[in-house]
Image (cartoon, rainbow, N blue to C red):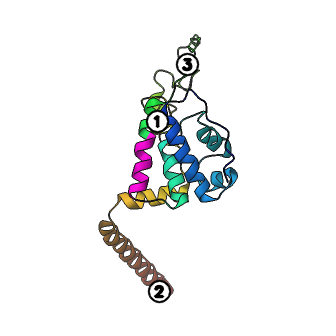
C-alpha cells in the first residue's frame, strides 16, 4: 500500500513522526480509506486530512485506527503519547476573527451563532456534549467525536461493573413474573 504524498517540509518533528507512524498503521490494516471510514466514525476525507498532516486527528480517531489494526495494550498507549506530543506541536493557522452578530430587537435568540459557539443563554438548551464547544479540547481540535452505536455499547459496558447489573435484571424479571401471574389470576377470576 502506501504511495503517500510527501509531508510538508515545515512540519515539526513530532508531527512528522506521528503521521508517519499513523500511515504505517493504516497500511498495516490493508484497507482503503473508504473501508477505513466505514469501520470507524470518520470519513474518507477526514482520514485523508489526518494522514496528510493537514489536520490533527481526534484522539478517538487514533484509538479507532488502533482497534481496526488489531493494536492493543502498550502499543496503543504509545500511539496515545505520540498523539499528545504531535497535537502540542501541530502548527496552528491563525483563526480569522468572527464578526459580531446583530441582536434582534427582542433580544438575543438562543442557538448557535457565527463560529459555532452557542449564543449567550443558549447553553441550557443544548444537551451536554452536543454543543460545538463541548467536543473541542483546549487547543480547538475535536477530542470526542460522535462514535458508532456499537462503540458506545462497549464503552458503557466497560464503565459499569457487571456485578450490580445482574441483581437488577433478576429483580426486573421477578417483577414481570409477578405482574403476569396477577394478570392471569385476574383473568381467571373474571372468566370463572
* Numbered range of the magenta stretch: 72-83
Camera-nearest label, 2 or 1: 1
Residue plotted at (60% across, 58% down): 29
**Residue 158 quadrant:** bottom left
For the N terminus, the quadrant is bottom right
Residue toward you, 185 or 180: 180
Q: Position of residue 6 (x, y in %)?
A: 65, 37
User: Label 3: how many residues lie within 10 Å, few (<14), some (14-19) or many (20+)?
Assistant: few
* In front of the other: 81 or 184: 81
Camera-side mark, 3 or 1: 1
Q: Which residue is mark 1?
A: 14
Q: Name the residue tied to disc 3.
A: 95
How many numbered callouts?
3
**Up-down: is 155 above or below 136?**
below
Q: x and y percent of residue 23 in the render?
A: 58, 47
Judging by the rendered image, the residue that carries numbered circle 2 is 188
Foreground of the two, 37 or 121: 37
Of the two numbered discs 3 and 1 on the same chain, state the one appearing first in sequence.
1
Near mark 1 (Cα within 10 A), the count class, few <14, some 14-19 or many ≥20, is: some
Residue 90 drawn above or below residue 32 = above
Q: Is residue 57 magenta?
A: no
Q: Is residue 83 left or right of residue 102?
A: left
Q: Residue at x 42, y 29 (%)?
A: 138
Nearest to N terminus: mark 2 or mark 3: 3
Relative horizontal placement of residue 129, taking residue 20 as reference (left or right): left
Amino acid at each position: 500500500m502506501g504511495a503517500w504524498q510527501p509531508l510538508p517540509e515545515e512540519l515539526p518533528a513530532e508531527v512528522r513522526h506521528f503521521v508517519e507512524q499513523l500511515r504505517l498503521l493504516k497500511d498495516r490494516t490493508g484497507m482503503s480509506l473508504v473501508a477505513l471510514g466505514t469501520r470507524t466514525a470518520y470519513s474518507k476525507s477526514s482520514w485523508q486530512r489526518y494522514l496528510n498532516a493537514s489536520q490533527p486527528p481526534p484522539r478517538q480517531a487514533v484509538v479507532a485506527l488502533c482497534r481496526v489494526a488489531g493494536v492493543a495494550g502498550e502499543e496503543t498507549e504509545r500511539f496515545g503519547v505520540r498523539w499528545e506530543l504531535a497535537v502540542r506541536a501541530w502548527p496552528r493557522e491563525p483563526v480569522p476573527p468572527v464578526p459580531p452578530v446583530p441582536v434582534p430587537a427582542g433580544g438575543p435568540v438562543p442557538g448557535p451563532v457565527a463560529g459555532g459557539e452557542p449564543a449567550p443563554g443558549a447553553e441550557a438548551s443544548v444537551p451536554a456534549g452536543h454543543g460545538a464547544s463541548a467536543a473541542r479540547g483546549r487547543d480547538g481540535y475535536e477530542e470526542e467525536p460522535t462514535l458508532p452505536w456499537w462503540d458506545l455499547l462497549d464503552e458503557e459496558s466497560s464503565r459499569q461493573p457487571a456485578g450490580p447489573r445482574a441483581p437488577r435484571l433478576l429483580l426486573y424479571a421477578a417483577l414481570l413474573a409477578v405482574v403476569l401471574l396477577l394478570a392471569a389470576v385476574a383473568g381467571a377470576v373474571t372468566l370463572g
